[in-house]
Amino acid sequence: MVSGHVESLFSAAYDGELSPDARAAFDRHLGECSACAAAFAELTTAVDTLREQPRAQMPHPVRLPEGSPVPGRRWFEVPARLSQGRRLLAGLTAAGLVVAAAAAAVVVVGHLNSGTVVPSSSSAGMSSGVALAPGTAIRAPLPSPQSASLLPEVGLLPVCSPKALPISKAEALEIPTGFPNHATEDNGVSTGVVATQASSFAPGATVDIYARLIDDSSHAVSLPCTVLVGPQSSSSSPGDDFTMAVPTPVAGLTVDGQPLLQVTVPATAVAGETYDILVPAPDAAVILTIQIS
Amino acid sequence: MDDEALLDRCRRGDRDAFTPLVHRYQDELYTMALRLTGNPADAADVVQETFTRAFRSLPRLRGATVRAWLFRVAVNCSHDIHRQRSRRPADPLEDSEGRVLDLPDPGLGPEATVLQRERADAIRIALLALPHDFRVAVVLRDVNQLSYEEMAQALSVPVGTVKSRISRARGLLAAALRQSPAVFPRAEEAW
C-alpha cells in the first residue's frame, strides 16, 4: 500500500519504471487521492506537451574544418607520472611499442593502431609481454572503464589516477611565466594544458613537461595518467629512446608538489625534426609540438 | 554503418566518415540546443561549434558512445554560448535570417495553428525559467529521449542523479506551465 502522497514516484511512473507491484499500488493511491491524481495528470500533460513539440531542423549546413580529422602521426604511449626515482626507457619497434624500465621493473607492450596507440581500460586487458616486479608503484586502471568497447586491446599501464584538485579552472589553466612552449585544448568536454620551460630541444637533452586536465562540466582538475610522445613524420627510425623520470616540482603546474614527467629527447633525433607530446584527456587530447634544435 | 564503425574510420583519418555523423545528429542536436538556449541563432552556433570540436577530438574519443559524447559537447557549448551572450529577442520559430523552422502542421486549422504556436511559446518560456541542470535533464530526456544511461554518460553523473534531476525538472516544468491556457485549457475556463 502507498501511504501519504506519491509525487516522488510521478517521474518514474511516467517513464514506466515502476515495478508491477509498485505501479499497482501507485494506481490504487491515485484512485483514492484526488490531489495526487490531479497532480500526476498535470505532470503528464506538461511532459506530453514538451514531447509533442516538433523536431527543428538545422537551418544551414555544418562547415567542417579542412583536412583530415587525424593528422598523419604515429604515437607511442608512456606512463606520465612515475614513482620517485623510477626511470623508463621507451622505444619504438617495428612491430609496435615497447616501454621498459631501466631496472627491469616494468615492461609494457602495446601496438600502433590506425596511427594512434590508445590504452587498455583495465589491468585485465594487459597483453602478453607485460610484467610487473614486486612492489612496483605503477598502477592501473584508466579512469573510463566503460570505454572498453571503443578501445583496442593494448597492454599499457597508466601509473596514476586522475586527482581532483581544489582549485578553479582558471587557476588550473594559468601558464606560469617562464614557460615559452605551451598548448591548451578545449573541446567542450574537457580542457587540457601542457607546458614546458624548455626553449630548445637538443638531442639527448632532458625536458620537463607539465600538464593538467580540467573537466569542463564539473571543473574537476586532474593530472593525466598517460602521455603520448611521437615523431610527426615517419622518418624516425625504430629504436628512438625516451628517458622518463620525475623532474623537480615547479609552482603553478604541479599538484601536491608533484610535476608531470621528464622527457629526454632521443639522442638519435635529428635537428629540424618535430615531435608531438600528447596528453590524452578522457574525451580528447592536448598536443605540444617541439622541434629538435 | 553504425556510429562505432564511422568512429573507427575517423580514427584512421577518413574525413568522409565524419559527414554521416553530422547528418545523423545535426537536427537532434539543433533541437536540443534550441530548447536549451531558446534562440535559433545560438542553437545553430552550438551545433556548428559541437561538430567543429568533434572533428578535432572525435578520433580520440574514449569513455562514451558517440551519441552521448556529442550531446555532452553540445550541452557544454549551449551553456557557454547562452552564458556569454546578452539576452536578445528570441523566437523559436525563426532562425537568424527570419526563416520559419518549426512549421505548423498545414492540416491544422487557423485556431489549432494559433494554439500550437502558443504552446511552443509556453514551453520555451517554461524551459528557460528552469535552472540549467534541470533544463538540460528534461530536454535530454523528453525532447531527445535519451536513456538514463546515455544521459549519465552525457552529463558525467550517476544514473541516480539523472533520475532525480528529471523528476525535479518535470515537476518544475508542470508548475511553470500550470497557468498556460494553451497547455491547460481548463485553467483558462476556470479563470
Image (tube, coloured by chain):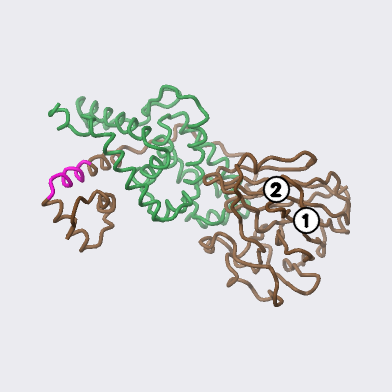
Chain colours: A brown, B green
Residue at image position (41%, 22%) is: B89
Q: Answer above or below: position of A83 versus A273.
A: below
B49 to the left or right of B144: right
- Residue B181 image-quadrant placement: top left
Q: How many marks?
A: 2
**Depth check, front residue: B142 or A158:** A158
Q: Which mark is residue A234?
A: 1
**Depth check, front residue: A54 or A138:** A138
What amino acid is labelled 1 in the image? Ser
Q: Is residue B65 visible?
A: yes
Q: Does the magenta run of residues contain A35?
A: yes
Q: Does the magenta run of residues contain B54?
A: no
Q: Answer above or below: position of A107 versus A77.
A: below
**Residue A184's x, y, as percent?**
67, 42
- Could you tell me which chain the residue with mark 1 belongs to? A
- Could you tell me which chain the residue with mark 2 belongs to? A
**Residue A97's x, y, as percent?**
73, 66
What is the span of residues highlighted in magenta in the rendered image? A33-42
What amino acid is labelled 2 in the image? Ile
**Residue B40's x, y, as percent?**
43, 30
Distance, label 1 to label 2, CA atoms, is 18 Å
**Depth check, front residue: A92 or A245:** A245
Sequence-wise first label, 1 or 2 = 1
Q: Is residue A91 visible?
A: no
Residue at image position (55%, 54%) is: B7
Q: Which mark is residue A287?
A: 2
Query: Of helix, strand and loop, which one carries label 2?
Result: strand
